[in-house]
Amino acid sequence: MNPIQTKAKAAGVNLDRLPVHIGMIMDGNGRFAKAQGFARLWGHHKGYKTLRTALLDCSDLGIRYLTVYAFSSENWRRSDDEVAGLMQLIEKSTRDEVPTMMRNNVRLKVAGRLKELPASLQEAFQFAVETTAANTGITFTLAVNYGGRAEIVDAVRDLIKSGVPADEVDEACLSRKMYLPEVPDPDMILRTAGEMRWSNFLIYQAAYAELVVTDTTWPEFKQEDLFAGVIEYQSRLRKFGGVTG
Ligand code: FPP
C-alpha cells in the first residue's frame, strides 16, 4: 500500500471497491477568482494546479480512468480573452506535463470535436497522446470542445456513413462509435461548486453513474474532498435498474 492508499484507508475509503472510472466537472474557477478579487483566468490557472494534484492522487489511489471536462462546446460563448486564455493554458500544460505523465505512467487521451481547435493545440495533443500511448497506468482523458449531444450526433453520422441498416442499430454498435469506445463508462461523476447538473458531460456514458457534488470550488478541491467523494460513491447502492440483496 502506498502513502495515499494508507491515508485513504484511514479516512474510510474501501480500497477494494474503488470506482474504475471517475469523471470530473471542474466547476467554480470563476467564482473562486472573483471571491479573491482576481480575473477569471487566474481561477483557471489555479484550477490547472488542482487538476495536476488530483490526477496524481487518483493515479496513486488506484483509479484506472479519469476524464475531466476542460472545455465544453458551450464554452466558446465566453469572452474572447477567456477562450484564448483557456486554449493557451490547455496547450502549455499539455506540453509541459508530458515528462510528468511519462514518469507517472499516465496515458493521455483527448475527446471532443478536436478539428475545430487551434492547430497548435491539436499538435500538442497529438504529440502528448502518441508519446504516452504505451503507458499502462491511469488513462487520463481531457474533454476539450466536448459536448455529450455533439458526441451522440457524431456517432450517429458515423453509423449512417458506415451503412448500418436501421434495424441493426443497437446500443452496442452506437457505443462503438463514441469518441473513445475503449474507455469504460464512468462509475462516478464528481462535480465541484455545488451545482447538481450534468451540463452535457458524458451524458450517453453516464447513464448509470453516481453524481457526487462538492460545495468547494475546483481550485479549492483537496485530496480529502476526493476521498470524501469516493466514500459517498461507495455508500450508494448501485442497482443498474435491477434489485439487489
Ligand atoms: C469551470 O469553471 C471551468 C472551466 C470552464 C474550465 C476548466 C479548466 C481548468 C480547470 C483549467 C485547466 C485545464 C487544463 C486541461 C490545463 P467556471 O469558469 O465555469 O467557474 P464559475 O462557474 O465559477 O464561473
Image: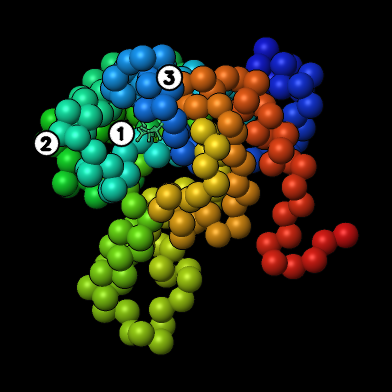
Mark 3 and mark 2 in contact (Cβ < 8 Å)? Answer: no
Q: Could you tell me if residue 57 is visible in this image?
A: yes
Q: Quadrant of the N terminus?
A: top right
Q: Nearer the viewer, mark 2 or mark 3?
A: 3
Secondary structure, mark 3, is: helix
Secondary structure, mark 2, is: helix
CA–CA distance in space, label 2 to label 1: 15 Å
**Could you tell me residue 141's position as x and y percent?**
40, 38
User: Can you tell which quarter of the image residue 194 is in?
Assistant: top right
Three-letter amino acid code at the position of disc 1: Val
Q: Which mark is residue 119?
A: 2
Residue at the disc numbered 3: 35
**Could you tell me residue 57's position as x and y percent?**
56, 21
Q: Which mark is residue 129?
A: 1
Q: What's the residue at 17%, 47% (across, down)?
A: 115
Badge 2 density bin: few <14, some 14–19, many ≥20, Cα 10 Å: few
Three-letter amino acid code at the position of disc 2: Ala
Q: What's the residue at 67%, 12% (across, down)?
A: 3
**Could you tell me residue 111's position as x and y percent?**
33, 45
CA–CA distance in space, label 2 to label 3: 34 Å
Three-letter amino acid code at the position of disc 3: Ala
Badge 3 density bin: few <14, some 14–19, many ≥20, Cα 10 Å: few
Front residue of 84 and 31: 31
Q: Quadrant of ligand 1?
A: top left
